[in-house]
Amino acid sequence: MLSFVNGSYLGVDKFKNYSINYSAQEADYLLSKKKGAFVSVVAVVSVVKALKVQLEEFRKSKPGLSVRAIAKSSNVNRYFLHKILDEPAEKVTNLDFTQVLLLSKFLTNSTNIRDTIDQSTEEIRDLLLSTFNVDYSASFAQKKCCTFTDVNLEDFDIFIILLLASCNHVSLDVVKKALNEKAWEKIAYLESLGKISVLENGRVVTADGSFLHIPSDIRIRHLPEILRRYFSPSNFGKQRCFHGLFYQSINADALKKVHKLHLEFATKLNDLMDSEESKGSIPIFSGICLDSFVSIDQMELNEE
């Protein structure tokens, strides 16, 4: 399993994406909910069935709309749509929760995470709440979350520029310092596309004030480059840099506890970084990863 947390720098949309891709057989073990319960395979099957009903009803209302067109309009990949429409719910072996959220957002015609969850069916709402931890008292919940599908997020420089712009407190000088000079032209390129704006005070922001949602595969792909470019071991011990590698052979019960510790720390870290008291001009990143060196079969997961 892999846990990666979006904080004020690496994804300000407040998503907490834990174990995005998983096998249905491992769902009871790997997917922990906010209050310590577990998402069951039965719940996952119910979500697939609910999405299929909604998607079929939508297609009936738009008989000329192809799956390809739905995928383009919703930013959901066609493979996921065909999986929901064509595969028996009980036989779905993996599910991308980001795709669930995007499809639900499209089907409910919502503009933000909170409204998507509120307008979804009970099965989908429960699953989304257990995966994307939404603070209903926060102002961000009412803002638009943008996936920037019409720009190349696989381009590392574009990815970094949009991340820093999403922080809303980062100056143009800081953005340039984070890039090499050859990449500066991409700032003008994104500005010409209307994706970012440079304010009179010199801060770089997303043009429409939206939060940047980063697909899990993009985050994971860029994490090694973020570490290579920006992580400096020489700063260790200066109250600005931390690193650690912890490894051991443990049992399934201990693994559950380790995973829970990661979730608890991630929640506290995200709340601190996103609080009004923490707002400032220093863009930082924090990555949290947990996995096993080998695959874990069901016997090991169920060991006492």
Image (cartoon, rainbow, N blue to C red):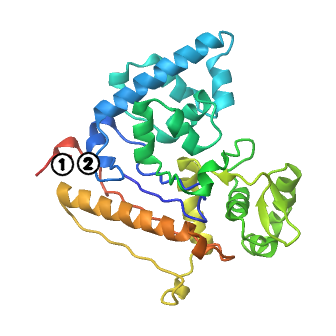
Of 153 and 256, nearer the camera is 256
Per the image, label 1 sits on a secondary structure element best described as helix
Q: Residue at x 74, y 54 (%)?
A: 209
Q: Position of residue 177 (x, y in %)?
A: 75, 75
The foreground one among 265 and 216 is: 265
> Quadrant location of residue 115?
top right
Q: Position of residue 281 (x, y in %)?
A: 69, 76
| Residue 125 drawn at (x, y percent) | 44, 37
- Residue found at x 57% / y 44%: 113
Q: Is residue 20 visible?
A: no
Q: Residues within 10 Å of mark 2 (few under 14, many from 20)?
A: few
Total marks shown come to 2
Can you tell which quarter of the image residue 179 is in?
A: bottom right
Q: Secondary structure at mark 2?
A: loop
Q: Which residue is mark 2?
A: 296
Residue 158 in sight from this viewpoint: yes
The residue that mark 1 highlights is 300
Kind of residue sitting beneath label 1: Glu
Q: Quadrant of residue 49?
A: top left
- Amino acid type at mark 2: Ile
Residue at far front of view: 137
**28 sits to left or right of 142:** left
Asked if 82 appears above or below 233 in the picture, the reply is above
Q: Position of residue 66 (x, y in %)?
A: 65, 16
Q: Is residue 94 left or right of residue 159?
A: left
Q: At 83% from the left edge and 59% from the top edge, which residue is drawn?
A: 197
Residue 166 vs 241, above or below: the answer is above
Q: Is residue 238 left or right of residue 50?
A: right
**Disc 2 versus disc 1: distance between alpha carbons?**
6 Å
